[in-house]
Image (cartoon, helix red, strand yellow):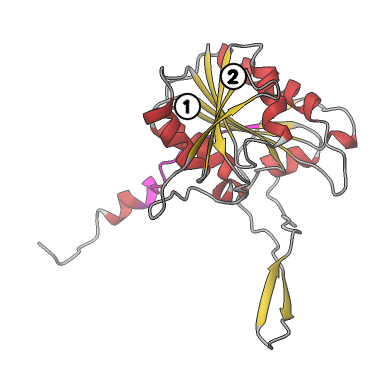
């Protein structure tokens, strides 16, 4: 099996290294990831600057790891699938991200965007993230082991080409994982704050608060199951059409044509 691995934390992040090691148990793994951290880049792509690409090797200087791209996660996926890989992958994985991508975080996540981009091109794609608590020492090897087992289960059911899945692993420092739940995406509002300050020249500026929390999540969703200590798996789609509303709107008298 040929596996393409990407992320939004950057090619040198510990999460992608740990996940690569686990995925090598399933097949050949090639990494195409951002050269620097691109968290919350969403599905943005680079249009006005060249995409510089550098070959990256393991510490031994001999073992080829993949390519570092000076661009966004979606850029990485486009280049990997259209230019860099000599053969198409059998599976695309994005992660292992530092921080959960549950609820509406899916819309901001560069990790999920890389997987979505692969699904555009009809590849089975899986985004994987690890939630953590502040100041915790992250257990990447254990999280990567959980991720591989979930990925193996998904593949054992032979998902259709273009299938897209979002996997979130709960904070391991809170105790053992309770199990796996397939859950819908939470879409209730998140609490956001900005720290307002004034610089020495008298200009106002803002720092985005890291406390981006869902205070009142909908029950039985990825956010609630993750908080209860379960790994969550959510099948996603990128068709944003509201099909119920479109049927109603097609009956309107538009007064044109």
Residue that appears at 63% across and 33% down: 95
As displayed, is residue 252 above or below residue 56?
Answer: below
Left or right: 72 with respect to 233?
left
Residue that appears at 68% across and 73% down: 206
57 or 157: nearer the viewer: 57
Left or right: 40 with respect to 159?
right
Q: Quarter-wise, where is residue 166 in the image?
A: top right
Q: Is residue 95 visible?
A: yes
Q: Position of residue 122 (x, y in %)?
A: 39, 27
Q: Which mark is residue 216?
A: none
Left or right: 158 with respect to 199?
left
As displayed, is residue 127 above or below residue 123?
Answer: below
| CB under 8 Å between discs 1 and 2 | no
Residue 202 colored magenta?
Answer: no
Few, some or many residues within 10 Å of mark 1 (<14, 14–19, 20+) = many
Give the residue furthest to the bottom.
202
As displayed, is residue 12 above or below residue 86?
Answer: below
Give the residue furthest to the front.
61
As displayed, is residue 112 above or below residue 257?
Answer: above
Q: Is residue 220 visible?
A: no
Report which residue position mark 1 lands on.
163
Residue that appears at 45% across and 41% down: 75
Q: Position of residue 90 (x, y in %)?
A: 48, 17
Q: CA distance from mark 1 to mark 2?
A: 10 Å
* Start-end of magenta stretch: 233-245
Q: Quarter-wise, where is residue 139 in the image?
A: top right
Report which residue position mark 2 lands on.
154
């Amino acid at each position: 099996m040929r596996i393409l691995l990407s992320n939004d934390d950057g090619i040198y992040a510990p999460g992608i290294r740990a996940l690569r090691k686990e995925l090598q148990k399933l097949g050949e793994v090639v990494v195409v990831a951002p050269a620097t951290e691109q968290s919350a880049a969403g599905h943005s792509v680079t249009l006005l600057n060249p995409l510089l690409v550098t070959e990256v090797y393991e510490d031994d200087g001999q073992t080829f790891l993949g390519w570092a791209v000076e661009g966004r996660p979606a850029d990485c996926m486009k280049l990997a699938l259209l230019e860099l890989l000599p053969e198409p992958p059998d599976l695309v994985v994005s992660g292992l991200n530092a921080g959960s991508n549950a609820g509406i975080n899916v819309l901001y996540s560069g990790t999920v965007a890389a997987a979505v981009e692969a699904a555009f091109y009809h590849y089975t794609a899986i985004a994987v993230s690890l939630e953590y608590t502040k100041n915790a020492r992250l257990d990447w090897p254990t999280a990567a082991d959980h991720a591989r087992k979930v990925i193996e289960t998904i593949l054992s059911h032979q998902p259709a080409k273009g299938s897209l899945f979002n996997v979130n692993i709960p904070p391991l420092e809170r105790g053992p994982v309770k199990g796996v739940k397939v859950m819908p995406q939470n879409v209730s509002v998140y609490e956001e704050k900005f720290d307002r300050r004034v610089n020495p020249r008298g200009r106002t500026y803002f720092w985005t608060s890291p406390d981006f929390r869902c205070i009142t999540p909908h029950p039985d969703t990825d956010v609630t199951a993750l908080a209860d200590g379960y790994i969550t798996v959510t099948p996603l789609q990128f068709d944003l059409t509201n099909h119920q509303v479109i049927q109603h709107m097609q009956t309107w008298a538009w007064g044109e044509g």
